[in-house]
Image (cartoon, rainbow, N blue to C red):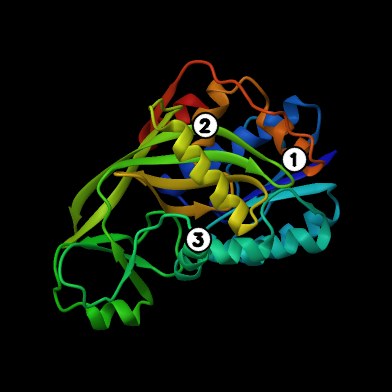
Amino acid sequence: MKILLAEYATGIGLDGTLLKEGKAMLSTLVNSFQYLGHDVTYLTAGSKIKNGNPIISDKKTFEQVLEEAAKESDAGLVIGPDELLGDMTDIIERNTINLGCPADTVRLCADKLLCTQRLELNSICVPKILDPAHEGKSVIKPRYGCASEGVRLKLSNTGENAREKEQDCISTEYVEGEHLSVSIICGQRTLPLSLNKQFIDIIEYKGETIFDYKGNQVPYRTEHEEEIIQVATRTVEALGCNGYAGVDIVFGDKAYVIDVNPRPTTAIIGLVKTLKAEIGDLILMNMFGRLPESVSLEGECTFTKDDIEDII
């Protein structure tokens, strides 16, 4: 098959940590699909990876090049910021087979308010949505955003209500516990891949208390693993996810779903080091409902944002 992979940071030429993480996810997928014998192309603004065939794009031409390349491909998968991913997924769906989540699901997951409400309707535990004027500790997050970007901890009512409303933020209760994630493939069937530990620091930055993602441990073993994976499975099924997805969870007195990523996540970098199967093969098998009953993991991979390039 001719498979197109597009990762936004690499495709438009961002720099810094975003490019390192994006390029690492892209390389991981390109390597797997090419190992399986597929003809793999990827979008890039100039940064090259070891395998695959590059197609040059930049910030101005990314969507145009994506559409042209999709027309020449048998299947495609796009990775990008959640608030932009819906439109990019539309392009894939119009022109080839989409290996990832449907555009409507992507848009639902990107809207943190509607996503939380949908999960509540399906009796899935989520942090309570609070009034911005709530007195006491709470989490402020952009209604539309990607992972922990722009998420901050508010320790008390500090008169920020007007700014929060202007920025279209939502306020939720703060849940104490372990920061975890579940990597999962879903569609006609659901196949949990791994439970992961996220290294999250709470730091002071430019006068605000923010959540800073540092890295992952894949897999992570805990006595609550079965319970957490069951919650993640119910979550992706309730939202209509397809392909590879990541469910962020804080485990305190129980498992709280914090965020749903309708796309490959950074944890995939460690996953492929321990998974006794090819991730590309599982993604393609998912198209036809032929996923295995389970997968095996061997060993453990721990990485930080700083050493991502050293482990791919």
Nearer the observer, 108 or 40: 108
Within-10-Å neighbours for mark 3: few <14, some 14–19, many 20+: some
Task: Tell me which corner region of the image, top left, top right, bottom left or bottom right, holds residue 296.
Answer: top right
Tell me what residue is drawn at x 79 percent, y 40 percent: 289
Work out which quarter of the rendered image holds the N terminus and state it: top right
Asked if residue 103 shows in the view, the reply is yes
Three-letter code, disc 2:
Ser
Tell me what residue is drawn at x 35 percent, y 45 percent: 254
Q: Position of residue 279 (x, y in %)?
A: 66, 31
Task: Tell me which corner region of the image, top left, top right, bottom left or bottom right, holds residue 280.
Answer: top right
In the rendered structure, find residue 119 and report the number of the disc placed on it: 3
Q: Are marks 2 and 1 in contact (CB under 8 Å)?
A: no
Three-letter code, disc 1:
Asn
Q: Position of residue 294 (x, y in %)?
A: 65, 27
- Whichever of labels 2 and 1 marks the residue nearer the N terminus, that label is 2
Classify mark 2: helix, strand or loop: strand
Within-10-Å neighbours for mark 2: few <14, some 14–19, many 20+: many
Classify mark 3: helix, strand or loop: helix
Task: Tell me which corner region of the image, top left, top right, bottom left or bottom right, holds residue 218.
Answer: top left
In the rendered structure, find residue 286 and report the number of the disc placed on it: 1
Q: Nearer the viewer, mark 1 or mark 3?
A: 3
Q: Position of residue 112 (x, y in %)?
A: 45, 65
Q: CA distance from mark 3 to mark 2?
A: 21 Å
